[in-house]
């Protein structure tokens, strides 16, 4: 998936690119946006770019009736404050507690059909890391932040993830080409699965492009920062295969030549 910062996911739920098309059997960002835009309830608007001489106007399909008159090309300071106030509840992170972990879902939907079609109700590594960064910036949320990070660490330490790392370390060619994206370390899972299994489609792991080294790099970066600050201690390191998974992930990224490997 492209553009999965917490801000981008928020905006994706409000408006989407009107030129996106679904391609092939694999679910992509284009097909997700196409599903959202096909509802028929969107308001079609055109906006001036900041540099109209160089860049043309851009088009947005706005799905939120609440915000359709609030999205503008330019804002005053008071308008920005008003927008922050209007979206205050929307921007709050909702944590999902399970016996096997604490999760930040990419998004939630009122109807199961949209959730099933987009899979934004799954747990995404990158989105959860952005959520963790928001939580850890507030001392009052430090306990919840650590729970989220440890849950992601446990996901990266599952037997399936460790096997993917070991397989690529042994044979980096497993990542060559487009059809082998499922061989990469996975970056998304079903929070309802006690073993943090893949999102399922017709009883099988859904085909997805998991080649997202930027998410893996952010994960390692934040993990190291948590160690440096003492947030993560020796007891945390010693649980299960956490230490093993970190060592394997570093070797995996090296064997995958992450610096030249294209992200999805």
Image (cartoon, grey):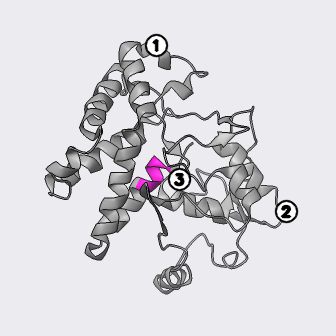
Q: CA distance from mark 3 to mark 2?
A: 30 Å
Image quadrant where one finds the C terminus: top right
Measured from the top left, where is residue 162 in percent x and y? 38, 30
Q: Does the magenta-highlighted stretch encompass residue 79? A: no
The picture places residue 83, in percent across and down from the top left corner, at 54, 80
Ranked by sequence position, the earlier of labels 3 and 2 is 2
Q: Please tell me whether mark 2 sits on a helix, a strand or a loop.
A: loop
Q: Residues within 10 Å of mark 1 (few under 14, many from 20)?
A: few
Tag 2 residue = 40
Which residue is depicted at the point 36% across and 27% down? 259
Question: Which one is in front in this view, the residue at disc 1 or the one at disc 3?
Answer: 3
| Residue hosting label 3 | 191
Q: Quadrant of residue 64?
A: bottom right
Q: Horizontally, is 173 left or right of 258 in the view? A: right
Residue shown at the point (48%, 74%) measured from the top left: 92
Q: Is residue 238 left or right of residue 104?
A: left
> Which residue of the protein is positioned furthest toward the right in this rendering?
40
Mark 1 → mark 3, Cα distance in angstroms: 30 Å
Note whether residue 122 is visible. yes
Residue at 76% from the left image edge and 42% from the top image edge: 21
Image disc number at residue 173: 1
> Are there few (<14), some (14-19), or many (20+) residues within 10 Å of tag 2?
few
Determine the CA span between mark 2 and mark 1. Answer: 44 Å
- Total numbered labels placed on residues in the image: 3
Q: Does dot 3 land on a helix, a strand or a loop? A: loop
Give the extent of the magenta segment: 124-128
Query: Is residue 137 visible from the viewing direction of this image?
Result: no
Q: Are marks 1 and 3 in contact (CB under 8 Å)?
A: no
């Amino acid at each position: 998936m492209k553009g999965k910062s917490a801000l981008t996911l928020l905006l994706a739920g409000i408006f989407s690119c009107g030129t996106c098309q679904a391609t092939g059997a694999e679910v992509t960002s284009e097909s997700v946006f196409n599903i959202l835009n096909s509802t028929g309830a969107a308001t079609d608007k055109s906006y001036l770019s900041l540099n109209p001489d160089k860049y043309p106007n851009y088009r947005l399909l706005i799905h939120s009736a609440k915000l359709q008159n609030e999205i503008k090309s330019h804002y005053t300071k008071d308008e920005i404050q008003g927008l922050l106030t209007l979206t205050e509840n929307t921007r709050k992170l909702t944590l999902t507690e399970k016996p096997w972990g604490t999760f930040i879902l990419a998004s939630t939907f009122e109807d199961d059909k949209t959730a099933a079609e987009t899979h934004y109700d799954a747990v995404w590594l990158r989105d959860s890391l952005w959520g963790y960064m928001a939580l850890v910036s507030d001392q009052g949320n430090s306990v919840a932040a650590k729970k989220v990070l440890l849950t992601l660490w446990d996901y990266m330490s599952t037997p399936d993830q460790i096997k993917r790392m070991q397989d690529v370390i042994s044979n980096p060619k497993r990542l060559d080409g487009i059809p082998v994206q499922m061989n990469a370390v996975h970056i998304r899972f079903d929070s309802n699965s006690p073993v943090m299994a893949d999102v399922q489609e017709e009883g099988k792991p859904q085909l997805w492009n998991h080649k997202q080294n930027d998410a893996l790099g952010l994960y390692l970066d934040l993990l190291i920062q948590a160690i440096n600050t003492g947030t993560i201690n020796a007891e945390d390191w010693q649980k299960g295969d956490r230490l093993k998974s970190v060592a394997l992930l570093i070797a995996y990224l090296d064997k995958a030549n992450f610096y030249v490997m294209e992200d999805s």
